[in-house]
Image (tube, rainbow, N blue to C red):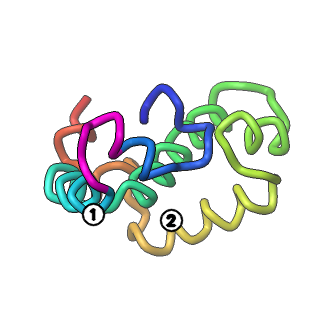
Amino acid sequence: MHMKFRERPNVAKMAAAASMSRSAFSLAFRQAMGCPPAQYLAKLRIAEAEKLLKTTRLTRDEIAHRVGFESAVGLYLALRSHSRSSHQSKDPLKQCAPRLARR
């Protein structure tokens, strides 16, 4: 998922790659990571977008497309929603997977 976070999530493909049913995969993923696959992917995208916003001169549209959002507006809405739900946490992955947030 970390390597293909720009693509649309497909739980069926991830489950097949893990030789599991969709429901078993979703349950195992949630237990291991602390959130469902789609939410985890959204947090990965947000973390990468925040990094690119701080470290590059790319436009918001370029960043949005690079991390898997369809537009700068979609990225803006995701960032705004994330900042409200995370209580200004500096690490978007912290709420989902504390192990990964420590990297």
Q: Is residue 36 above or below residue 49?
A: below
User: Quick check: 87 left or right of 103?
Assistant: right
Q: Is residue 49 above or below residue 42?
A: above
User: Quick check: 30 left or right of 56?
Assistant: left
- Residue 17 position by quadrant: top left
Residue 3 is tagged as none
Q: Is residue 81 above or below residue 49?
A: below
Where's residue 96, x and y in %? 28, 56
User: In the structure shown, which secondary structural element does the residue marked by tag 1 occupy?
Assistant: helix
Which corner quadrant holds the C terminus?
Answer: top left
Q: Which kind of residue does numbered mark 1 sit on?
A: Ser
Where's residue 78, x and y in %? 62, 63
* C-alpha separation, residue under disc 1 versus residue under disc 2: 26 Å
Q: Residue at x 51, y 54 (%)?
A: 42
User: Quick one: label 1 or label 2, which is nearer the N terminus?
Assistant: 1
Question: Which residue is denoted by mark 2 in the rendering?
Answer: 82
Residue 23 is tagged as 1
Q: Which kind of residue does numbered mark 2 sit on?
A: His
Specify the segment rendered in magenta: 15-21
- Residue 51 position by quadrant: top right
User: In the structure shown, which secondary structural element does the residue marked by tag 2 occupy?
Assistant: helix
Residue 67 shown in magenta: no
Where's residue 34, x and y in %? 21, 59
User: Quick check: 43 left or right of 53?
Assistant: left
Front disc: 1 or 2: 1
Q: Residue at x 43, y 31 (%)?
A: 2
Few, some or many residues within 10 Å of mark 2 (<14, 14–19, 20+): some
